[in-house]
Amino acid sequence: MSQEKPRSAATDLVQAGRFAGSGDWLPVNPPITRVSTVLFKDLEAIRAAERAVGGPTRSLTYGANGNPTAFALEDVINRLEGAHGTCLYATGLAAVAQMFQSFLRPGEHVLITDAVYTPVRRLARTLLDAFDIEYDYYAADGSDIESLIKPNTRMIYAEVPGSLAFEMCDLPALSTLCKARGLLLAVDNSWGSGVLYRPLELGADISLMALTKYVGGHSDVMMGSVSVTEAHWPALKKMCTAVGNTVSPDDAYLILRGARSLSARLAMHQANAMHVALWLQQHPQVARVMYPALPEDPGHALWKRDCHGCNGLLSFEFKAVDQAQVDDFVKALTLFGVGYSWGGYESLVTQVDQHGTRSVADWSKAGLMLRLHVGLEDPDELIADLSNGFAALG
């Protein structure tokens, strides 16, 4: 008998995370279940639930342990990530913090990619320093990792691709290195969102996502997730339960609603971003475009091997401008909003900080850079908006 073919992400996003009703019916959307106090039929039932709550299985004794709407979202994220278990957190950064708390102990050492999401650097300076956990940054492509591993190294933390220049690293090779040395491999998968990239399938132990971004997709809710393989689920679940971590059922519902269209939205983001990237490549005032789907991108071969598409994020470097001109460029834009984050339906622009975001890479000789999130607007109208920006350079 042949095995059933695994379902695609597009199908899982629509079909997963539903709860059966009490009769012969099934709601398309799981209900929003707001809960604090939970009632049990007798003392033995509540004792059984208490015994289970600190372990690896779901047990609802109180609202701080979760809620059925969040459980439905966990099911969807498990399918997306190919994970044994997932915990949800109030923000993506909170997910990183709780992951560190779950797997790192005082005196241990973690290697963090130099391409990491900038607030994680602040997290390292506060949380890791406070608990005497050592950390160093390695080159975005992973080329210097082996020379930085110490006897007390416990984890390598990757982000594929990087947040600002979208550098790729060879995750399967990194996994082989980690397994040979007994190290944990954790990966920020917010860029890939489980549709474009699946770190656990490529050998990672832990995959994190800012669900705020593409999975939610509508710029109206904050949440993060940590998904793990079976071997690492008890440690993650135990810490999550111990600190009373939970998410609002209303927020979980919004993420679920956004997730249903994730695959289709990403395809449109990629089509629009590629249109813009190709136009930028030909512009006389652009030195380079950073987008892994471009054949000229340094990480293109790894992207083509390991990824299942691209999204709406790209950066570009100006040839010869000063800061005042970059300010004028951005002021001239009307369709690209100036703001943090990405992954919603709208287009955004922000400047790449070439001083506070890297410790290993030398960007001092590079020109000024902007990062774009190309949204779901008409791509020709986005290009016309960017043309206005270039015209403002003088």
Image: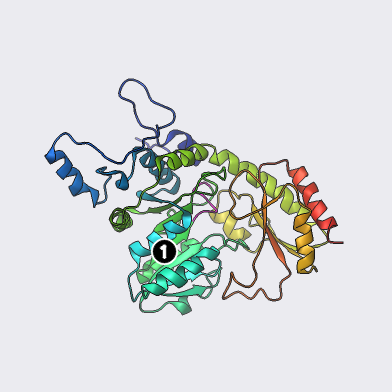
Q: Secondary structure at mark 1?
A: strand
Looking at the image, what colour scheme do you see?
rainbow
Q: Where is the C terminus found, in terms of image quarters?
A: bottom right
Q: Nearer the viewer, residue 79 or 285?
A: 285
Q: Percent from the top left, x then y, of residue 130? A: 39, 73
Q: Amino acid at mark 1?
A: Leu
Is 42 magenta? The answer is no
Q: Is residue 257 left or right of residue 87?
A: right
Q: Residue at x 47, y 79 (%)?
A: 147
Residue 68 rendering spot, x and y as whole percentages: 34, 38
Residue at which label 1 appears:
185
Q: Main secondary structure of the magenta part?
A: loop
The outermost residue toward the top is 24
Instruction: Please state the horizontal and vertical placement of residue 387, each as a whole percent of the image.
Output: 81, 52
In the image, residue 297 sits, relative to residue 227, either above or below, namely below
Foreground of the two, 78 or 222? 222
User: Who's the residue at 46% across and 49% down the image?
Assistant: 223
